Image (cartoon, rainbow, N blue to C red):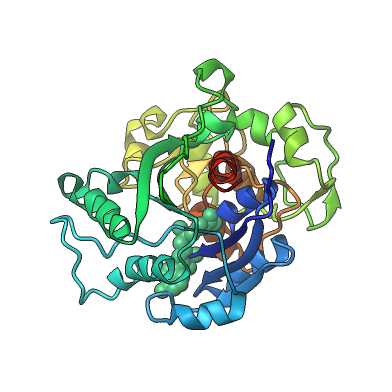
Amino acid sequence: MNKNNNWKVLDLFCGCGGLSLGFMKQGFEIVAGVDNWKDSLITFEGNHAGAKSILTDLGNFDPIELSKMIGVVDVIVGGPPCQGFSISGKRNPDDPRNQLYAGFVKTVDHFKPKAFILENVPNLISMAGGKIKDEIINDFSLLGYEIKYKVMLASDYGVPQNRRRVVFVGTRGPNKFEFPESVFNDQKNKITTSQAISDLPEESIEDGTEHKISPTSEYQCLMRKKTHKIFNHQITIHSQKTIDTIALVPDGKNFKSLPTHLQNTRKVNIAWTRYNSMKPSLTIDTGHRHHFHYQYNRIPTVRESARLQSFPDDFVFAGTKTSQYKQVGNAVPPLMAEHIAKALLVALNETYS
Ligand SMILES: C[S@@+](CC[C@H](N)C(=O)[O-])C[C@H]1O[C@@H](n2cnc3c(N)ncnc32)[C@H](O)[C@@H]1O
């Protein structure tokens, strides 16, 4: 039983708020999201009722000012960009990107939350032979936190996508957090791309239009639970050459299925890839246009990408289409975040009841 489901959360580098959404769904109170990107904050604000959105450069700010705005928080979550770490394992204090991770550490130091969640790209663990990971653990240990970490695979938690993220969980005092068990650990029961998006039409839909196709999977019912309307489903119009080329690639295949003279038309190894309708999707990115719909001769729309990231249909993205793709691709899948939040709730209630 959750004895207290009202823990206050501050989301740093919040983007559109995928991580926060998962916590919100588990009853945490999202007090504020901080980012230096206006579009993402407009989306954040529109989808996290009651939360403040704060436009700030987290590489150059004073946590005291932040606490004047939001008061006390119990949990800090966030994914600082990791580029400030060098592969030698030493952080270069003169590199401005380094200030972003430092910003996260200094905010934890100032607010002294009961727990924090720091998520990042999985190869952070192995960078510089593990020195980066060790440094993170060391930095927070010095602040009095006990750390656990794990690389989590989103499709293990009902997300129709094989996205991996490393998640560090720190608690003040003994760390009672247990990483959630994977629920969909058999390839056969993972949510597939077609289960995720087959009810979304080939053509563009004007924002706010009602669905004309009934849901065909439990996952689609879940995504449509709070709205019958479709948003952010404007298709990309490709050149005829692109349409003709991708039309030659079968479901789940890539450039290797093309005639030899077309195989090298894009010089990346992910070129001309169609999602596999029978598997979770590849990692949703910020809009590089190399991954195509498993059936239609176009890239997925923002809404299809959002579905593959487990954003429900009532979560509406603001900004230009390019900006929306970036917000979706940057996010922690809300369903995976929800599993983390649920496990943290257990640990917090056990420690503080
Ligand atoms: C990986 S995304 C975060 C995604 C988010 N956790 C989610 O689940 O939706 C990283 C975010 O860091 C933000 N960011 C990068 N540099 C920043 C800075 N100097 N100050 C504040 N935010 C910054 C970016 O705008 C981006 O939204």
Q: Residue at x 64, y 61 (%)?
A: 30
In this rendered view, identify the residue nearer to me: 75 or 332: 75
Q: Residue at x 56, y 52 (%)?
A: 19
Say whether residue 316 is left or right of residue 81.
Answer: right
Q: For the image shown, how many numbered marks are present on the structure?
A: 0
Examine the rendered structure and indicate whether residue 5 appears above or below residue 178.
below
Examine the rendered structure and indicate whether residue 233 appears above or below residue 347.
below
**Viewport quadrant of the C terminus:** top right
Q: Position of residue 11 (x, y in %)?
A: 54, 62
Q: Residue at x 49, y 47 (%)?
A: 241
In this rendered view, identify the residue nearer to me: 113 or 264: 113
Residue 35 appears in the rendering: yes
Quarter holding residue 123: top left
Quarter holding residue 10: bottom right
Examine the rendered structure and indicate whether residue 204 appears above or below residue 101.
above
Q: Position of residue 228 (x, y in %)?
A: 85, 45
Examine the rendered structure and indicate whether residue 39 appears above or below residue 227.
below
**Viewport quadrant of the N terminus:** top right
Report the residue that reaches farthest toward the front: 353
Residue 16 appears in the rendering: no
In this rendered view, identify the residue nearer to me: 203 or 177: 177
Quarter holding residue 258: top left
Q: Position of residue 276 (x, y in %)?
A: 52, 28
Q: Position of residue 239 (x, y in %)?
A: 54, 53
Say whether residue 165 is left or right of residue 196.
Answer: left
Q: Residue at x 47, y 69 (%)?
A: 111
